[in-house]
């Protein structure tokens, strides 16, 4: 199993993908590309905002076959083409209220034959906890990527 | 809220208690969407028996159907397991499926290198 669980509040997924980092980065950051894979098959994916700059917002919706809609949104924190992307993420409920705030960090490392993609999603229990995490987050991410390598 | 949710959980657990139905769910999670015939293919039981299992899974809210011309397709509802899943496993499932699609697209957009 290549997926390792870092902790109860951090999800980590790793993939070796036979494509260069530039192609993967574009698939994450260009709306027309993102909506081709972001939502499950049969769900109509819409990209309402994708302001890929630090501080820029994003919002996407998934329309189920029965017509109901799930939305998720967040703010970009790190945008370093084609190596790294970090953004906050929360599901929204029917009233538009955001659920648990999380941060997603994706790194694209060129390796022979393609790219090593590492995705980390970290859950913050409270806004205060998240703010406290900001300082140490990049360092721990680098450490984790090294462990992965 | 908890009381209103109980019947849903009952039907969810009842649906997942059967090994054939669990195998169907696992197969659908791996494949995404399948025709009813493709769902039935690896199982050594009749198509009507598979259809009954699919009905149970559908009533429990685990799968949904789509009809296109004469074909019937089934897939796992994206949030089907949310009532019984942890945040971590729900997100893992979400990303695993998304990264499968990402990987296929990225590979398709990458020119093949000649093997020498």
Image (tube, grey):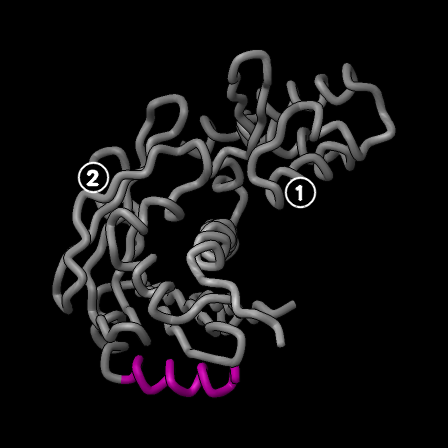
Q: Position of residue A13 (x, y in %)?
A: 50, 66
Q: Chain of mark 2?
A: A
Rendered view: A124 above or below B49: below
Question: Callout 2: 10 Å neighbours few (<14), some, many (20+)?
Answer: few
The residue depicted at 38 percent of the width and 29 percent of the height is A64
Circle 1 SS class: helix
The quarter of the picture where residue B25 lies is top right
The quarter of the picture where residue B73 lies is top right
The residue depicted at 47 percent of the width and 54 percent of the height is B108
Q: Residue B62: tell me if it is visible.
A: yes
Q: Position of residue B8 (x, y in %)?
A: 53, 27
Q: Which mark is residue A47?
A: none
Residue indicated by mark 1: B26
Q: Is residue A113 left or right of residue B52?
A: left
Circle 2 SS class: loop
Residue indicated by mark 2: A96
Asked if both marks, 2 and 1, belong to the same chain, the answer given is no
Q: Residue furthest right?
A: B44
Depth check: A8 or B22 in front?
Answer: B22
Q: Position of residue A117 (x, y in %)?
A: 45, 70
Depth check: B99 or A103 in front?
Answer: B99
Mark 2 vs mark 1: in front: 1
Q: Which residues are magenta?
A: A136-149
Question: Do labels 2 and 1 touch, CB within 8 Å?
Answer: no
């Amino acid at each position: 199993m290549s997926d390792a669980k870092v902790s109860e509040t951090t999800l980590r997924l790793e993939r070796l993908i036979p494509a260069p980092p530039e192609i993967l980065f574009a698939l994450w950051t260009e709306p027309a590309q993102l909506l081709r894979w972001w939502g499950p098959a049969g769900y109509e994916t819409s990209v309402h905002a994708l302001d890929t700059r630090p501080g820029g917002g994003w919002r996407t919706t998934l329309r189920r076959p029965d017509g109901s809609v799930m939305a998720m949104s967040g703010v970009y924190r790190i945008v370093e083409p084609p190596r790294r992307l970090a953004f906050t993420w929360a599901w929204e409920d029917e009233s538009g209220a955001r659920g648990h705030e999380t941060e997603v960090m994706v790194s694209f490392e060129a390796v022979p034959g393609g790219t090593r993609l590492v995705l980390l999603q970290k859950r913050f229990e409270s806004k205060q906890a998240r703010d406290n995490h900001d300082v140490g987050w990049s360092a721990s991410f680098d450490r984790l990527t090294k462990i992965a390598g | 809220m908890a009381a209103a949710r109980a019947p849903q959980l009952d039907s969810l657990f009842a649906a997942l208690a059967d090994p054939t139905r669990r195998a169907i769910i696992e197969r659908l999670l791996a494949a995404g969407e399948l025709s009813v015939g493709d769902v039935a293919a690896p199982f050594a039981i009749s198509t009507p028996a598979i259809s009954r299992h699919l009905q149970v899974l559908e009533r429990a809210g685990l799968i949904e159907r789509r009809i296109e011309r004469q074909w019937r397709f089934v897939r796992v509802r994206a949030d089907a397991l949310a009532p019984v899943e942890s945040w971590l496993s729900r997100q893992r499932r979400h990303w695993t499926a998304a990264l499968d699609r990402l990987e296929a697209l990225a590979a398709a957009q990458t020119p093949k290198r000649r093997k020498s």
